[in-house]
Image (cartoon, rainbow, N blue to C red):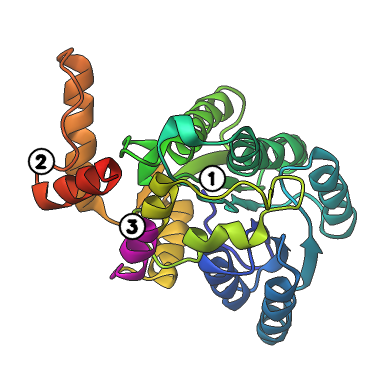
Amino acid sequence: MISNFKNKTAVLTGAGSGFGIECARIGAKLGMNIVLVDVQQDALDKATSEITAEAAKYGGQVMSFRLDISKAAEVEAMGQTVFAKLGAPHFVFNNAGVGAGGLIWETTLKDWEWVLGVNVMGVAHGVRVFTPMMLEAAKKDPAYQGHIVNTASMAGLLNAPNMGVYNVSKHAVVSLTETLYQDLKLVTDQISASVLCPFFVATGISQSHRNKPGEFASSDVKPTKSQLIGQAMSDKAVGSGKVSAADVAQKVFDAVADDQFYIYSHPKALASVQTRMEDVVQIRNPTNPFAGKPEIGEALKAALRAE
């Protein structure tokens, strides 16, 4: 937990949009030093300009880095630069992520590597690079407080069909973060962790293919029918979300202040999580995820089976 954010340093990945930029806005107003990290240069430039102006009003410094969080060397170099200028960060938000849908056997090798590289290894690199710095700072200063928040998804607690690779990546982030929390409790009382599990919130993740690196893009591989259907469903669900990214960012800061581990944008969705957990402990086959809205399930089934 962090009881006072003033003059503390926050490192935020995926800072050019969505939860990242909204957390940067809150942090700047609280007088934090803000480190903005994003893969999209134009979004990062815009965010840097806005947050620099905001932070100046409250005494905070701003640094920004355009990098790919799936690349270990890039995250390591950024971490060393941040440490040299601002010292160990206090709040690390491993937030950047990408989305991809479609029937799981239709996911290409390149998409497996891209999604797991960003969503899983990007978080792993953030944890690997910054946690040792934070632990060393805690040893040197009994007043030091640190917190790591990793962005997963309700897809890390559920397994909706036609979202295979994304589900796999987000389950990994939940597992990683639960373990991080327990590991930290073994060695320190000054640093904690939380996992953010948002449901459908307008953040831009449904259009993350815009930032797919050339090494993972292939012009001769056309999206399958299931992938096109998955993209359309994701666009519709995200676009119709009633909870804003700003609302979720405030929940993140509240959780860091209160040392709350699980952060949800839509607590009502936990009913589906409970059903899944009951499937597990009662050794019953997975419940139809569309049981409450059968028309959606039937429409998806019909679309996938149509010739």
Q: Amino acid at mark 2?
A: Ala
Part of the protein shown in magenta: 232-242
- Real-space Cα separation, disc 2 to disc 1, in angstroms: 31 Å
Residue, disc 1: 150
Residue pointed to by mark 3: 233
Element type where label 2 sits in the image: loop
* Mark identifier at residue 291: 2
- The answer to whether residue 238 is magenta is yes
Residue 184 showing in the rendered view: yes
Foreground: disc 3 or disc 2? 3
Q: CA distance from mark 1 to mark 3?
A: 25 Å
Q: Say which quadrant the C terminus sits in.
A: top left
Residue lying furthest front: 307
N-terminal of the two: label 3 or label 2? 3
- Residue at image point 31% right, 39% down: 160
Q: Is residue 303 left or right of residue 287?
A: right
